[in-house]
Image (spheres, coloured by chain):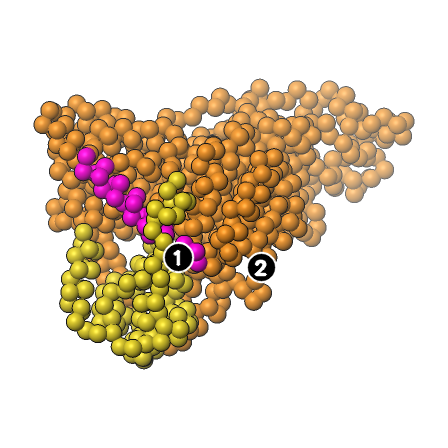
Amino acid sequence: MRLLLFTLITAALFAQAPAPAGNAQNGRKLFESYGCYQCHGREAQGGLGTGPRLGPKPLPFAAVQKYLRQPTGQMPPYTTKVVSDKDVADIYAFLQSVKQPPPVKDIPLLNN
Amino acid sequence: MASSSKPPIGRQNVGRRNFLKGTASGAAALAAGVKPARAQQSEPAPEPARSATAAVATQEKDPSLSVEVLTADHPGSDFMVDVIKALGFDYIFANPGSSFRGLHESVINYGGNKSPEFLTCCHEESSVAMAHGYAKIEGKPVCVLAHGTVGLQHASMAIYNAYVDRVPVFMIIGNTLDAATRRPGVEWAHSVQDAAVLVRDFTKWDDAPVSLQHFAESAIRAYKMAMTPPTMPVLLVADGDLQESPMREHERPHIPKITLASPPQADSGAVAEAARMLVNAQSPVIVADRCARTPAGLKALIELAETLQAPVINQHGRMNFPSAHRLNQTERSRGLIANADVILGLEVWDFWGTVNSLRDQVHRTSRPLTKPNTKMIAISASDLNTKSNYQDFQRFPDLDLSMAADSEATLPALTEACKRLLTGDRKRIFEDRANKLAEVHQQARERMRLEASYAWDASPISTARMTMEIWTQIKDKDWSLVSNNAWPQRLWSFDRHYQYIGGAGGAGVGYGAPAALGAAVANKKYGRLSINIQNDGDLMYAPGVLWTSAHHRIPLLSVMHNNRAYHQEMMHLQRMANRHQRGITTAEIGTTIKNPNIDYAAMARSMGVHGEGPITDPKDLAPALKRALEVVAKGEPALVDVVTQPR
């Protein structure tokens, strides 16, 4: 419930801030080379006990950027010294590009 | 039966290599073709006790008068096997070593290599980790043999894992204490004054017997201590002279009766107080970690939870609670802890860490996860045996009621105490709670299936996809997951004690592959299908377990979770780079296992194990698993290498 509230409040607070244009292809490369995939998976699907799913439909750009720079939980910080704002925009573009998986009901193995 | 007043048997004989009978008649008998061992045995008068040094001195004085006895019909190691058999060990797991050559020979020839059967291991760390996994399934130890020096050094990390995990392991190590009888060279390097000191910080008990009677009593004592909660590893030193020196005719030391101690139950007053707190609580939570030692523990926890209709958080130290049970609320752990007014911890390894959060940033800060007045109750056998040096005992929690006792043994009394306090009103409240919990349990299961669908078709293959591909193949069989993995707990249906064995305990890498094999050895006689989701880095510590599985025909399906990295360490390194604001692209240096990629299927095949892979397309997984399972069904091991997402 707290997570849901956090997500809703965050989304509301940052909903107005538009995401800058980014290069999704480069963002995918950066997602790997900057080690984001280590906790969040190579497809941003999340990892059990390591990091939440980031895509598809990521949180608003401003919320992602703010948390990236100054995380309040366990995530290590990605400061401007090592990740530029343009890099963040590219990574965000990658997160936006992640495709929605097929519905669970259409995956036989998940309905056993 | 030997009398305790007699001198040590091992010392009554004059040493294993220089036993010289200084009589001319003996020499004549040898010349006439009489076997010296028989000639020695026909002598009615026992040889007076003397030192090996004295025997050497006799020889040096007049070697022509000596007849060297070269054989022995009843070495002390035969009696050691009698003791080992009395303890009911099914197996001995060992890498061979000269310091226990006498015992090894007695096991396979005098003992017939049955009950126990000698299983050849390729590393002592594997021997002990196999014993660890075996005990998790079978509820009792096997015997592990090792060199007292180099073997024990290899074994030490696995012993530590078992110690932290509170698992019984019974070790016998070889050593030659008497410097006057050692072979020059290597045997000196393989001898030690106090062998067990190396692992004394993380074993429950050890001894170095100096007679066979001493060996028998200490072996039974060690077994009893290992099996009394908190269960832990124990160690005996089998002296080389004691193993190899012949026993005197008619000498049969007494093997004490084996009577295990009943596990310690909590004080009845404390149990009654805990019941009162739990029954009166509005939001009680049960947290179980290393709780269910046996199937009875699983059943007892279900009964307590259903009596209280209280949510259970399974921390997976053991197979504590059915995954599909409506009261299994593990996925809501944080929220339940935050809302609880009473928390009951059952063999919880890290109670403090369960109810507090610590941030791993430059300045480590912590905060409670609970409400200010939440009452906390602990039942833990670890309070009965905590050592000081190694810090596995975790940070000290704020408890309101603490019972130094075995949880499994205490649960029936606690449940009965709760039942006695139930009123109609409380029962109605509990039923309402149960209905709500059933609903959120179902929601959590659906949420997990949704999470599993993300990256479903990805390559490298998602661990959720791999988990469900395996489940589809095994769900209708009598299976046992002999590894510690996150997704199966969320997506499979666990309801039997042998279906899960928990983790390493001390988080020492190199545990997984041998523990899985040891568990599979235990499962074999029940005809269960053992499934091991095997981390790549872990397998590379001691890949010889593959050979052991093939050589001894242990049915086991290993599916590689091959993320080509020591991934946990990579995340730690990334954290450091980010913290220091430099080189955030270099975390793969020293943490990955690629360039070249390891061909695990080929490695398996090289050791006689069916191998498939590497598999990178999820569509190829099901056919490979089917083929591998056909091999396992024939009683053989198989390995499928799957290139996976990190976690």
Relative image position of residue B123 (x, y in whole percent): 59, 48
Q: Earlier in the sequence, mark 1 or mark 2?
A: 1
Q: Main secondary structure of the magenta part?
A: helix
Whole-angstrom CA distance, mark 1 to mark 2, is: 24 Å
Relative to B268, does residue B613 appear above or below in the rendering? below
Camera-nearest label, 1 or 2? 1
Percent coordinates x, y for residue A34 in the rendering: 39, 71
The answer to whether residue B374 is left or right of residue B378 is left
Which residue bears the numbered disc 1? B455
Residue B489 shown in magenta:
no
Residue at x 18%, y 51% (from the top left corner): A1
Residue at figure coordinates x 63%, y 38% from the top left: B552
Q: Chain of mark 2?
A: B
Say what secondary structure mark 1 lies in: loop
Tell me: B161 left or right of B395: right
Give the chain coloured orange.
Answer: B
For the magenta stretch, what is the residue range? Answer: B435-458
Crowd band around label 1 with a 10 angstrom C-alpha radius: few (<14), some (14–19), many (20+): many
Q: Which residue is mark 2?
A: B598
Q: Which mark is residue B283?
A: none
Name the quadrant of the N terminus of chain B: top right
The chain in yellow: A
